Amino acid sequence: MKLSAHFYVIVTTLLLVAVAVMVFFNVNYSIVYTTVIIGQAWWIFTVYKVLTNKYSTKKTFEDWYEDHPIGKE
């Protein structure tokens, strides 16, 4: 994946904060509504990008957590 998952999380967070700020300051309904629709489309796009990523690993559920391996060192 060319863009890291952090980028998608940051953009999603910024959209949520933007909507909250716009609602707090009573911004025009159509602008808030459009931002919410863009946020939902962005979320669907993010899920699609994560699910279609060509990432593979040799780790299994038996490896437990990557930062705290159990039994294998």
Image: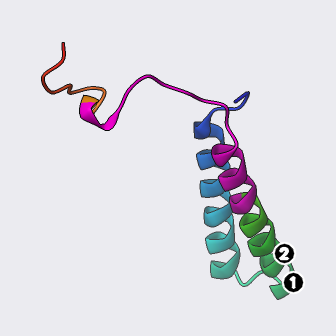
Name the amino acid type tagged 1.
Answer: Ser
Location of residue 14 with respect to 67 vertically, above or below: below
* Percent coordinates x, y for residue 26 in the rendering: 72, 84
* Percent coordinates x, y for residue 34 in the rendering: 84, 75
**Magenta stretch: includes residue 2:** no
> Is label 2 in a helix, a strand or a loop?
helix
Q: In the rendering, which numbered label is found on residue 34?
A: 2
Image point 20% across, 27% down: which residue?
68
Q: Nearer the viewer, residue 39 or 29?
A: 39
Residue at the spot of label 1 = 30
The answer to whether mark 1 and mark 2 are in CB contact below 8 A is yes
Q: Quadrant of residue 32?
A: bottom right
Q: In the rendering, which numbered label is found on residue 70?
A: none
Location of residue 38 with respect to 29 vertically, above or below: above
Q: Is residue 53 left or right of 33 when viewed as pictured?
A: left
* Percent coordinates x, y for residue 65 in the rendering: 27, 33
Magenta region: which residues?
A: 43-62
Q: Nearer the viewer, residue 48 or 43?
A: 48
Image point 73% across, 27% down: which residue?
2
Q: Is residue 57 left or right of 55 when viewed as pictured?
A: left
Name the amino acid type tagged 2.
Answer: Thr
Q: Nearer the viewer, residue 67 or 60?
A: 60
Q: Residues within 10 Å of mark 2 (few under 14, many from 20)?
A: few
Location of residue 19 with respect to 26 vertically, above or below: above
Image point 75% across, 55% down: which residue?
45
Q: Quadrant of residue 1?
A: top right
Location of residue 31 with respect to 68 vertically, above or below: below
**Magenta stretch: includes residue 56:** yes
Question: Residue placed farthest to the left in the image?
Answer: 71
